Image (spheres, rainbow, N blue to C red):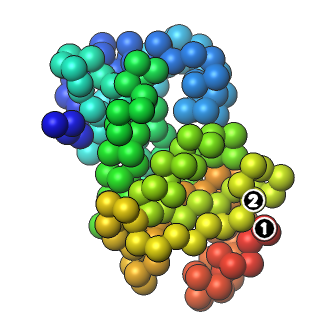
């Protein structure tokens, strides 16, 4: 059975190896740009200070097959998720994304922002499967805010009962501005360009 765990200092090397094994395309989708190996090691060192917001799937032990990092701030969250090439198609991405949705719901955070969601059809598909809304910037492959029913895995909704939204990072400024100017967050979401 696959399990999501919080890493310890002992996982440092395995997490770094996971990220270093990502192709340039995968690094772009995960980080927003193609990070150098040196930058990845520095990033992993920083992750180990953020224990509690970082989760991994270790399968088969000791290989890290997936990493989730959720950084909560200002009523929203930044999400980073990656799955090793050898572990794709085995439900690891779904498991990690479901964990992110549950964490967001537990903290009353309705939106998870992710870099390059516009370019990441696989992550958008996983999000829809997990019952999350998906919001991409205009001109992307998926330009509409999708409104699914409750998730396949029963991911709880946000503080007012609506599903958690996975939104492209490029929408963050406009999303925050609309939410701040309109007391009804649902109405603010509907004002986003489609």
Q: In the figure, 18 relative to 194: above or below?
A: above
Q: In the figure, 10 relative to 76: above or below?
A: above
- Classify residue 18 by image quadrant: top left
In this rendering, would 186 be left or right of 174?
A: left
Q: Secondary structure at mark 1?
A: loop
In this rendering, would 126 be left or right of 91?
A: right
- Classify residue 32 by image quadrant: top right
The residue carrying pointer 2 sits among few (fewer than 14), some (14 to 19) or many (20 or more) residues within 10 Å by Cα, namely some
Q: Nearer the viewer, residue 49 or 61?
A: 61
Residue 162 position, x and y percent, is 46, 78
Residue 35 position, x and y percent, is 60, 20
In this rendering, would 141 be left or right of 130?
A: right
Residue drawn at (52%, 11%), measured in percent from left and top? 38
Badge number at residue 71: none
Q: In which quadrant will I find the N terminus? A: top left
Residue drawn at (23%, 31%), measured in percent from left and top? 7
Q: Secondary structure at mark 2?
A: loop
Write down the residue under mark 2.
143
Can you name the residue that lies furthest to the right here?
139
- Tell me which label, 1 or 2, sits earlier in the chain: 2
Verify CB contact (< 8 Å) between mark 1 and mark 2. yes
Q: CA distance from mark 1 to mark 2?
A: 5 Å
Residue drawn at (71%, 65%), measured in percent from left and top? 144
Q: In which quadrant will I find the C terminus? A: bottom right
User: Is residue 68 something one can see in this rendering?
Assistant: no
Write down the residue under mark 1.
194
Residue drawn at (64%, 61%), measured in percent from left and top? 135
The residue carrying pointer 1 sits among few (fewer than 14), some (14 to 19) or many (20 or more) residues within 10 Å by Cα, namely few
Residue 63 position, x and y percent, is 27, 17
């Amino acid at each position: 059975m696959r399990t999501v765990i919080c890493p310890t200092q002992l996982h440092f090397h395995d997490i770094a190896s996971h990220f270093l094994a990502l192709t340039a395309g995968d690094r772009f989708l995960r980080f927003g740009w193609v990070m150098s190996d040196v930058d990845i090691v520095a990033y992993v060192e920083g992750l180990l200070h953020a224990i509690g917001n970082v989760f991994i799937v270790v399968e088969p032990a000791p290989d890290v097959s997936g990493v989730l990092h959720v950084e909560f701030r200002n009523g929203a969250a930044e999400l980073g998720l990656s799955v090793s090439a050898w572990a794709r198609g085995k439900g690891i991405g779904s498991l990690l994304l479901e964990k992110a949705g549950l964490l967001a719901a537990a903290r009353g955070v309705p939106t998870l922002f992710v870099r390059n969601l516009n370019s990441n059809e696989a992550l958008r598909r996983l999000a829809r499967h997990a019952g999350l809304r998906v919001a991409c910037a205009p001109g992307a492959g998926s330009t509409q805010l999708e409104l699914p029913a409750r998730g396949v895995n029963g991911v709880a909704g946000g503080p007012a009962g609506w599903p958690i939204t996975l939104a492209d990072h490029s929408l963050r400024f406009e999303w925050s501005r609309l939410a701040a100017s309109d007391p009804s967050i649902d109405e603010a979401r509907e004002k986003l360009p489609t």
